Amino acid sequence: MSLLEVENLSVRFGDTAAVAGVSFALERGERFGIIGESGSGKTLTALAITGLLPEGAVVDGAITLDGTALPQDERAIAKLRGKRIGMVFQEPMSALNPLMRVGEQIDEAIVLNSLAQATLNVNTLLTEVGLEPVHGQRFPHQLSGGQRQRVMIAMALAGQPDILIADEPTSALDLVTQRKVLDLIAQICERRHMALLFISHDLKAVAALCTRVAVMHKGRLVETGPTTQVFGKPQQSYTQKLVAASQFVARRPDRPSLGDTLLEVDGVTREYRQGGLFRRAKALRAVDKISFSLASGECLALVGPSGCGKTTLAKIIVGLDKSTSGTVRLGGTAYRGTDMPKALRRDLSLVFQDPFGSFDPRLTIAASLAEPLRLEGGLERLMVRERLVEAITAVGLDAAMLDRYPHEFSGGQRQRLAIARALVTRPKLVVLDEPVSALDVSVRGEVLALLTGLQAEFGLSYLIISHDLDMVRAMADRVMVMEAGKIVETGTPEQIFAEPKHRLTQESVAARLPEIG
Amino acid sequence: MRRILNHPSLAIGLTATALFALIGLLSLVWTPYPIEQIVISRRFLGPSPEHWLGTDNLGRDMASLLMAGTYTSFLVAALAVAIGAGIGVPLGLAAAAWGGAVEWLVLRLSDFVFAFPAIVVAILITALFGPGAINAVVAIGVFNIPVFARVARGGALSVATLDFVAAGRLAGLGNLAIAFRHLLPNIMSLLIVQGTIQLSLGILSEAGLSYVGYGTQPPETSLGLMLRDAQGVFLIHPWLTLVPGLCIVCIVIALNIAGDGLRDAIDPRLRQGQTNVVA
Amino acid sequence: MTLFVLRRFLGFAVTLFLAALVIFTLLDLLPGDPAQFILGISATPEKLATLRDQLGLNAPAYQRFFGWIWGMLHGDFGISYTQRAPVAGLIWDRLGVTLPLSLFAMIISMAVGLPLGIIAARRRGKALDTAIMVLAQTGIAIPGFWFGMLLTLLFAVTLRWLPPGGFTPWDENPGLAFRGLILPSIALALPQASILARVMRTALVDVTGQDFIRTARAKGLTMGQAVWRHGVRNALLPVLTILGLQFAFLIAGTIIVENVFYLPGLGKLIFTAISERDLILVRGATIILIIAVTATMLVTDIAYALVDPRLRERGAP
């Protein structure tokens, strides 16, 4: 008899079925993964198993734990939660009570689920997840993302559950921390003989951790089976699409030769003064004497963990922020940031990370795309329209879309529109801040292919900011690794991956999950 | 406009408010009797075909007084909202768009004004200039300024962090252009909802101020002034206080329902964060 | 935390200083000679001059201003023109009515409004919730002072349980004094309680949708337990903000309600003072009102920081 059996589960909201006909089984100590993109219903499935569905959800189907059906009554199922099933959620910042110290929150979990022979205490749990007793005294906002996630895991373990459900536990974390937390989960499951239900959109993470996997799409289970089989020889077309998308195609070996230096960053530093009434507080250096150059036609990637200063540097280069010292030179003209001359702004564009915030919801696409054309002063309406059509067709979309509003488009389409907006002034350099990380896996490949194509067609140069080493390897000619405001290593992707020299690079490369399939 | 019909509370509230406003406006051109007409011999009459709502302690027709009073109350509240929004919204937008010293100044100024409740401002103005309806307008209006500034700033800040604002800066837009083109349209719904709230509060405030004699002065009338007139005699003639009081209650409920409905119709997510400016 | 309190206190002091400046400027701009007013029309110029000297009216403006501030810090608010008594004493007497009235009103509104809001949130969507919210919606539309009139009609005229107005001083008969404040407190409390109920409900409903409630349930708490143990504290934050702001309106309301019940409070004092152009009294009473309002905001800010640890480090919002 399986530990957990789900039979024909369906979750409906009003008339729409968010989950339909989902069946699977979980054995004791087994590690089972559910793969799906946003809207696939994977989280709802997990919530249905623990009775935590939001109001208005109507559940149907049979869920049994050790042969007994899951109770309907809130009190009864609350007893099961924590004791038999532990859950770890995605956003550790909002998932912890901001007003309570984390130690107290863990303690609550222990007290709720204490068995007669309880020998657990908060410190034991903290150590098990790799934290120190002093962390227990802190409030959630005083801990880092990785630390908060460890706290969540400690809380989930407090009741010594048989099953651990982890829903996107590492999506909000950076590369190195991600690897550490995944390893931690694997170790704990091993040590405690706990079953793991691992839910994610990241195929590599699931492949690294789970022996069996299920793929969900639009609320239905598309394919199930052993990991090696599902990823190695996917049967369904959707699965095939997913597997293909997560394997980035390496760059074409023959790329046009690079031209002259286009962008020169010379000793740029950005300091922030901290402290209020008394100036004795030290200044924070987000960017510390950075110098590098970018050639025309080159694709340069800037990688580093969150907080390393790469976004700040990008903002200075694009002219949204001002350097404290040092200059930037674009095509010979020097500037410090916000003092960038208008004429120069045409040659530079920025594509933002989040497609959902890039467009003013009250303006039509045409109005938004036309905004940068103000820099070219004196363009007639007809000319403006021509340029808009040119830009929007270049990204593979239809000119009719110009008169619609942003909310009518999907994430992938909006990112294409953002690229169109970046192209409208016919720039020389396009800065891309995490261009695909907010997109669904299946869409990422298309957008990256588009970017590569555009670079060849228009002779663009790219500065890509990312934390995703795999994407960078597929796109970049050169990689710069940043840490704490300084560039710690430079090289071609092959060099970086084969022989990382700096400690951070080595960690990051080592943290990469193995390829699938 | 389809959306209005989808939200019954909005439809009801708006209709009711419009009704009251129309009655008030009507009083500008016609009332059953002129409101200044004092006929002592016909005072304290109950409702009758000639005087639909009876007469007050001076024989004036209650229905006429109610119509004119509604108009004055609305006018005072509306002018106060205009002052508050007209000055407060630009201040709030400036604070959000420019940040730095401008923001600091606006915040300190609004904290300062918050220390002066409308009644205190009304007291000061009356001490300086004597009583009058304009005192109420200024007093309530002044207190509305930091309210709107806060709301505008709060709304603009959450918009200002979105990428499309940065995109605007990249396109060469200055702070002023950003404020008008991107910030203001996106906080419009927030401001409209706040406007209805402040309108209903304004009517209540005007009532209070006129009641203690620091608002509308005779021979004009307002709902609050009617209550003041009733103060001496209501123990014996409760009708005189019931009529204007109920009228105030109905108008304010109508406005509040309309405001709630507006909020839900425009963006249900606005429900949170409305905490700092209630009443 | 101490730094936070200090900064807040500094802000408080600065605001008060500026407020005093504004009041002084406005009131001292007024034409009219207080000395003339006190001594009457028939006073001789010499007597007027002596009195002006005595009142310190010949000193330059800034000297008078700082003299006033200095005096206030020592509890001396000047001497009333019309009543020939220390302003501080007069205000203190009246505060004996206004302060307890505000306090009772605040207590009643919290005791009634907050629990009703919690109940409405727990029974969200059900009949009880709708009933409470309809009541609250009506409650905020009713002017406090008008409600006072209605209460008087019901309890004093029809039922004759409570007095319709007037006030017996505390030292004469505390029981009667208290009775005199019951109806006005309830009148004041109605709109406040309604607002608190609505805000509490909204805050609690919002909190219930938060992720950490889901985490609490994942640990093994039922929904009710999770909301009670984790939600209420978080919901208190917006409620605290409102409480502080409401106090400003409560003060205004108190002054007005006193009129309905013929209570000898601060309100009556101010109104008479204005009509008699006793500017020293107006000045003193106004600054007291402002101190009350600002002090409440200060206390609320500090209470907020006590509840929310995230604010303590950041200092100013």
Image (cartoon, helix red, strand yellow):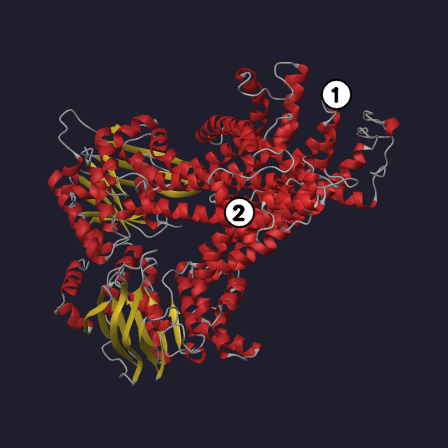
Seen from the viewer's position, the closer of residues A193 and A121 is: A121
Distance from disc 2 to disc 1, alpha carbons, whole Å, reads 44 Å
Q: Position of residue A212 (x, y in %)?
A: 20, 47
The structure residue drawn at horizontal position 56% and vertical position 78%, both measured from the top left corner, is A382
Q: Position of residue A120 (x, y in %)?
A: 15, 33
Secondary structure, mark 1, is loop
Provide the residue designation for mark 2: C20
Query: Dots 2 and 1: beta carbons under 8 Å?
Result: no
> Which disc is residue C95 wearing?
none
Provide the residue designation for mark 1: B236
Q: Quadrant of residue A419?
A: bottom left
Q: Position of residue C188 (x, y in %)?
A: 57, 29
Quarter of the C terminus of chain B within the rendering? top right
Residue type pointed to by label 1:
Ile
How many numbered marks, from 0 up?
A: 2
Seen from the viewer's position, the closer of residues A333 and B128 is: B128
Residue type pointed to by label 2:
Ala
The structure residue drawn at horizontal position 62% and vertical position 29%, both measured from the top left corner, is C258
Chain of the residue on which disc 2 is drawn: C
Residue A41 makes an appearance in the image: no
Seen from the viewer's position, the closer of residues C206 and A440 is: C206
Q: Position of residue C237 (x, y in %)?
A: 41, 39
